[in-house]
Amino acid sequence: MNGLSPTEIEALFRLMLHEMGPTGWWPADTIFEIMVGAVLVQNTSFANVELSLARLKEAEAFSPDAVAAMDDADLQDLIRPSGFYRNKSRTLQSLTRWYRQRFDCEPANALDVPDDELRRELLGLFGIGGETADVLMLYVFSRRAFIADTYARRLFSFLGCQLPAGYPAFHRAVAPAVLATGLSTAQLQEFHGLIDEFGKAYRDNEAKAESFIARRQQSDRPSQLTPRTKGPSVGPSLPEANAR
């Protein structure tokens, strides 16, 4: 893989944070809200997720005990705005029951479980794929993790990385370099938010070529990384770009 080094990734994070400011991602009032949101956001927008979260709160069904005990039809109706409500209802109940039985609804009770083991357990639950598992690892269990979502793929691809297809392969290719940085769990949480907000603001390579990342890359010495677009020649030197 032609990818970014840990030093470049850390400098990219600091550049994005400097230019964009903190995102405060993941938006939620409680840990359980993050868990529910991570499931509901699969294949839909966060605006639809917010509608479902509001319906759960209005129904006073916003707790692990309530969701685990809820009738399937009732839960499906409450989360209907998020789409795929039958599968998501089953996933929520599977995740919630595991969370109650395994850790008594307390993330701190998972501290003795190694990262790889915890991720495997999450992936073993119905409806929990790699992206959702990594969200839960990072935001619920406060483990250092990289969320290799669509926005991350677009950004890394723009920066010249040759990425394998599919979430698992992309994650295996990029996560080791990300986790080799000195970024803390809180900074990795913020990095995910920055990547997603950047992706929403600059939706294609042409837009990215006009972004602050491209402008900063132009001002530094060339490197082997170039964006996949016919825009300005932008060979990033991210560590130097952040040194000023």
Image (cartoon, grey):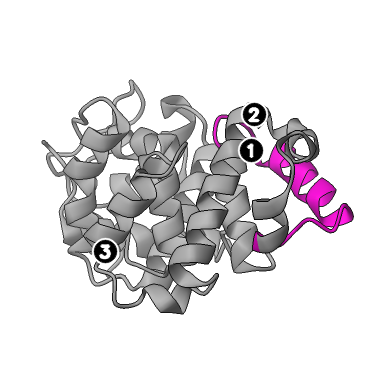
Label ID, residue 89: 1
Q: Where is residue 102 in the image (x, y as percent from the top left)?
A: 43, 65
- Which residue does the image show at 38% across and 51% down from the upper left? 122
- Which residue does the image show at 31% across and 34% down from the upper left? 167
Q: What residue type is labelled 1?
A: Ser
Secondary element under disc 1, as helix, strand or loop, is: helix
In the image, 50: left or right of 88?
Answer: right
Majority SS type along the magenta span: helix
2 and 1 marks in contact (CB < 8 Å):
yes
Q: Does the magenta stretch include residue 57?
A: yes
Residue placed furthest toward the top:
230
The mark that comes first in sequence, 3 or 1, is 1
Q: Name the residue under label 2.
A: 86
Above or below for 196 versus 158: below
Q: Give the range drawn in magenta.
A: 42-64
Q: Mark 3 points at which residue?
A: 115
Q: Is residue 58 visible?
A: yes
